Amino acid sequence: AREHTGSIQKGWEEVYNINPSIVEKAARHITSAAEFLENIN
């Protein structure tokens, strides 16, 4: 678990920095991932 990321959006940012495709795939199913992608574009 990533309880030290500070926020859900920060967690998605960390994953995105490692492998963007993970967040892109997750966004199809997880609202917070989709919101993260909307906010960075």
Image (cartoon, rainbow, N blue to C red):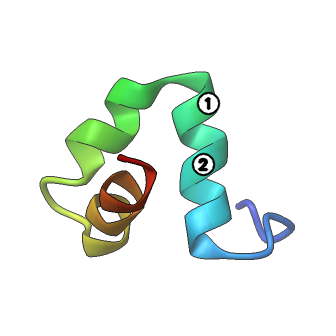
**Residue 26 placed where, x, y %?**
27, 49
- Check the image and name the residue furthest to the right: 4
Q: Which mark is residue 13?
A: 2
- In the displayed structure, 14 sits above or below 32; it is above
**Residue 13 placed where, x, y %?**
60, 48
- In the displayed structure, 37 sits above or below 35; it is above
Q: Are marks 2 and 1 in contact (CB under 8 Å)?
A: yes
**Residue 40 placed where, x, y %?**
44, 50
Q: Which mark is residue 7?
A: none
Disc 2 residue crowd, few under 14, some 14–19, many 20+, Cα 10 Å = some
**Residue 32 placed where, x, y %?**
36, 71
* Residue at (33% x, 26% y) in the render: 21
Residue topped by disc 1: 17
* Residue at (42% x, 28% y) in the render: 20
* Residue at (35% x, 46% y) in the render: 41
Q: Tell me the kind of residue under disc 2.
A: Glu
Disc 1 residue crowd, few under 14, some 14–19, many 20+, Cα 10 Å = few
Label 1 residue SS:
helix
The quadrant where residue 6 appears: bottom right
Q: Is residue 20 left or right of residue 14?
A: left
Label 2 residue SS:
helix
Closest to the observer: 36 or 11? 36
Q: Is residue 36 left or right of residue 14?
A: left
The quadrant where residue 38 appears: bottom left
Q: Quadrant of the N terminus?
A: bottom right
Q: Is residue 28 left or right of residue 25?
A: left
- Check the image and name the residue furthest to the front: 41
- In the displayed structure, 32 sits above or below 11; it is below
Q: Tell me the kind of residue under disc 1.
A: Asn
